[in-house]
Image (spheres, rainbow, N blue to C red):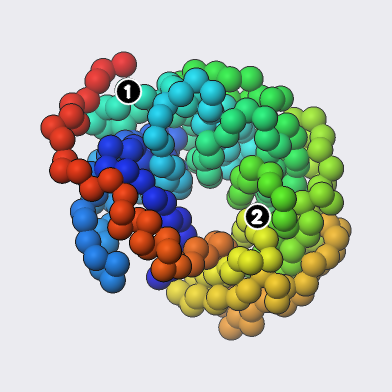
């Protein structure tokens, strides 16, 4: 196991949890079990009323549900949606619909934005599209969203990134990958077919992950056999978009990479900051509010 997300939060901050079924759930920080730094923690599925087969795809800390930020969502069908963060300010015990999904669609990832960033979407066949999030109008929670990337037969969206400086690190199921400067991805209009991000072929197989990294990061590759492979970003070749990449991991026959995550390192000063975060006793203010 490894750390995927690390947040420093106050007791009364909210954690928004988004599921593959397109629902949003709330947790207050004080509702989480408090434990020492060496504790394994508690599975989040034990804290939320998830349905059978439903899984959490994004966890986002929120201090204030203001009017100046948005929840940006992407689904496997290439649909995107932007909803004001303030629309998620009224919690309900059983969660709420964050995006309406078709039966064969699932929520891939969610990010909080300020409305001024570029967005990048990535598919399993090595395509990517970059466009300004201003190209997606804000809409209500129960709306279905709009087309972010035009998908062909057999394509599915696998990753959403909000553009910052650095690289896009792409990995394929047969253990190949590369990092490509973000600036190599041209901005286009929303809803296009995108450009090649990494070549997919018999050698590479499908793309299983694309994350934004810098040279100080490490990544973790995950196989269907449960193997975890950790490597530094600086050890991975930087290449242009329309290339195949290099071998990052040797996989056995029948073994495939199934995931890629950027690894969060816990430094001592971060731990000290977390220990000093607001530790006021839990308050009795968890009543749900109907929409």
- The N terminus sits in image quarter: bottom left
Q: Residue drawn 19% across and 31% down?
A: 286
Q: Is residue 107 left or right of residue 278?
A: right
Task: Quickly name the residue at label 2.
Answer: 212
Mark 2 crowd level (few <14, some 14–19, many ≥20, 10 Å Cα)? many
The answer to whether mark 1 and mark 2 are in CB contact below 8 A is: no
Dot 1: within a 10 Å radius of its alpha carbon, few (fewer than 14), some, or many (20 or more) residues?
few
User: Gap in Å between the C-alphas at discs 1 and 2?
Assistant: 32 Å
- Residue under label 1, please give it: 90
Q: Residue 62's mark?
A: none
Whether residue 258 appears in this view of the structure is no
The answer to which image quadrant residue 50 occupies is top left
x and y percent of residue 116 in the render? 67, 30
Expressed as whole percent of the image width and height from the top left, the position of residue 263 reads 52, 65
| In the rendered image, the vertical position of residue 36 relative to residue 64, given as above or below | below
Residue in the foreground of this view, choosing between 290 and 255: 290
- In the rendered image of this protein, does residue 27 appear above or below residue 83? below
At 41% across and 68% down in the image, what residue appears? 268
- Residue located 68% across and 38% down the image: 119
In percent of width and height, residue 164 lies at 68, 47
- 253 versus 209 height, above or below: below
Left or right: where 155 falls relative to 100: right
Q: Position of residue 63 (x, y in %)?
A: 39, 35
């Amino acid at each position: 196991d490894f750390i995927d997300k690390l947040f420093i939060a106050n007791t009364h901050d909210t954690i928004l949890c988004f599921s593959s079924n397109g629902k949003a759930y709330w947790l207050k920080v004080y509702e989480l079990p408090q434990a020492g730094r060496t504790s394994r923690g508690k599975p989040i599925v034990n804290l939320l009323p998830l349905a059978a087969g439903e899984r959490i795809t994004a966890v986002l800390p929120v201090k204030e549900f203001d009017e100046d930020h948005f929840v940006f969502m992407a689904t496997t069908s290439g649909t995107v949606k932007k909803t004001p963060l303030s629309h998620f300010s009224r919690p309900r015990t059983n969660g709420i619909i964050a995006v309406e999904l078709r039966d064969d669609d699932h929520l891939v990832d969610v990010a909080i934005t300020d409305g001024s960033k570029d967005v990048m979407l990535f598919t399993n066949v090595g395509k990517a599209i970059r466009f300004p999030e201003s190209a997606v109008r804000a809409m209500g929670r129960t709306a279905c969203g709009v087309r972010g990337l035009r998908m062909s037969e057999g394509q599915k969206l696998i990753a959403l990134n909000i553009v910052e400086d650095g690289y896009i690190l792409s990995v394929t199921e047969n253990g190949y990958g590369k990092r490509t400067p973000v600036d190599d991805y041209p901005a286009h209009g929303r809803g296009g077919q995108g450009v090649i991000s990494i070549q997919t072929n018999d050698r590479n197989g499908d793309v299983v992950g694309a994350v934004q990294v810098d040279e100080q990061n490490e990544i973790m590759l995950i196989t269907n056999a449960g193997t975890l492979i950790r490597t530094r970003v600086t050890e991975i070749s930087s290449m242009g978009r329309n290339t195949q990449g290099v071998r990052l991991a040797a996989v056995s026959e029948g073994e495939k990479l199934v995931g890629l995550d950027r690894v969060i390192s816990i430094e001592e000063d971060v731990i000290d900051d977390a220990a000093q975060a607001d530790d006021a006793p839990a308050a009795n203010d968890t009543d749900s509010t109907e929409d």
